[in-house]
Amino acid sequence: MQLALYPQGETVLAQIILVTGGARSGKSSHAEARARALPGARLYIATARAEDAEMRARIARHVADRGEGWITIEAPIDLAGALDRCDGRGPRLVDCLTLWLSNLMLEGRDWEPEAEHLVAALARQKSPVILVSNEVGMGIVPDNALARAFRDAQGWLNQRVARVAHEVEFVVSGLPMRVK
Amino acid sequence: MQLALYPQGETVLAQIILVTGGARSGKSSHAEARARALPGARLYIATARAEDAEMRARIARHVADRGEGWITIEAPIDLAGALDRCDGRGPRLVDCLTLWLSNLMLEGRDWEPEAEHLVAALARQKSPVILVSNEVGMGIVPDNALARAFRDAQGWLNQRVARVAHEVEFVVSGLPMRVK
Amino acid sequence: MQLALYPQGETVLAQIILVTGGARSGKSSHAEARARALPGARLYIATARAEDAEMRARIARHVADRGEGWITIEAPIDLAGALDRCDGRGPRLVDCLTLWLSNLMLEGRDWEPEAEHLVAALARQKSPVILVSNEVGMGIVPDNALARAFRDAQGWLNQRVARVAHEVEFVVSGLPMRVK
């Protein structure tokens, strides 16, 4: 299945914001600031799996950076379901699409229908969603085929989500550049 | 020979547009939309060589994305000659400078005079040219010297073409950011 | 120690400009043009160490690109000290933070307090400082842990310096995009 990137006439109810950028570019902090500016309970939808020491340290640092006042929901695979289940209470921060995609591919799932489920779920949300994602396609072509497949999938996923987003921001050195 | 990046007083006849961005960022689709908005026959100048299954799949996907109404010209090496030969009929989409540069380097050619020939050819075109290129220098320094040489060459080529272009767009998540 | 990225009420005396971008994106040339537009002696603070043939060639090319009229100061490690010692004479071009960070990490130093010393030094400068840095976090996640640690450190350093900078520019294909 090839992802239909440019559907006509998609309508989206709630405010959808995509925050993209490189590793350690300040994407998450910026996305958190965007969420804090919105009314309602703040829900943090975590896609990370704490499977090794490095990832646990990374998660711990994100938790510390975020500070108090967040309700955390873990959704390493069923992101669309998680969004539906916690809709209507306040802004959701999804951090991040890159780990979610990585989880899908590591489990051998077909990421394209999952991406369509996510986009369909975004379109029916009543509360805002701020999604964090990574730019991974601006280095030299990776040697191994799996890494190439991942960066292609990530690029398509970012395009697909950007298409339905009301705002897209590209973060450089901690500072947002408005793309859409 | 060191590329003279900042010549004075270059004049260019036809509209030259450089569309750059990461892998699977939506550069080609955006560049195609730019070409479709211009009058005349639409010529697609392909620099790819269908040398393995992965590249053939990639080419097939680009062909499908592009849709009908394009005349395809293959120019893996002699890009300047191809531009001269098809000038005056309509907009040309060159997809992409990264594969062209890669072809030159794989054949052991000196890419710098070839880049100058390309820029000289761009300056004498009467019909518009839209060139797609990749950003490859925003990852970690590659381990091997050839990859480092390639990313240096790609960076210089992008600067050199951007210098004569009337417009430069940087595509993120399928959306163009105006650079020039 | 975790870097305090978002201190309140930092004040900075002289004009601080951060110029960031990919490898061979034209960052240095652009930063040099910014420095040349400012009055006073032009001081070039070089962080590179000429330790192998490739680096010597790279330094030689930068020297040739820069042209005459620069006073060069070598500061591979003590960047804050170098800035303090040459303050008050004219604009300083620091090229680049990436090599400086790399030098610190290769010597096994703790880069975070060094980054704080640098930021503190920037805040007390009376003459302008233009700092060049690299975007290294927009490729695929590197295989080795040291490369991942480096790209994380580089991302944080860029954020930290951007925070106190008056201007931040992101260079693509030789052309600056204003970030701040």
Image (tube, coloured by chain):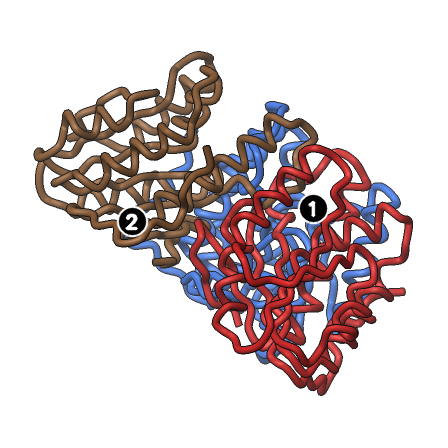
Chain colours: A blue, B brown, C red
Residue C156 found in image quarter:
bottom right
Q: Quadrant of the N terminus of chain A?
A: top left
Residue C7 in percent (x, y) is at 75, 79
Mark 1 and mark 2 on one chain: no
Q: Which residue is at a point 58% across and 48% down the rendered structure image?
A: C62
> Which residue is at the front of the view, A127 or B11?
B11
Q: Residue at x 54, y 47 (%)?
A: C64
Q: Position of residue A70 (x, y in %)?
A: 73, 70
Numbered tag placed on residue A76 in the rendering: 1
Q: C117 above or below A20?
A: below
* Left or right: where A134 falls relative to B93: right
Q: Quadrant of residue A145?
A: top right
Observer-side mark, 1 or 2, equals 2
- Amino acid type, mark 1: Pro
Q: Which residue is at 40% across, 43% downward?
A: B4
The residue that label 2 is drawn on is B165
If the image is split into quadrants, where does the C terminus of chain A sit?
bottom left
Q: Say which element carries label 1.
A: loop
Amino acid on which the number 2 mark rests in the picture: Ala
Pointer 2 chain? B
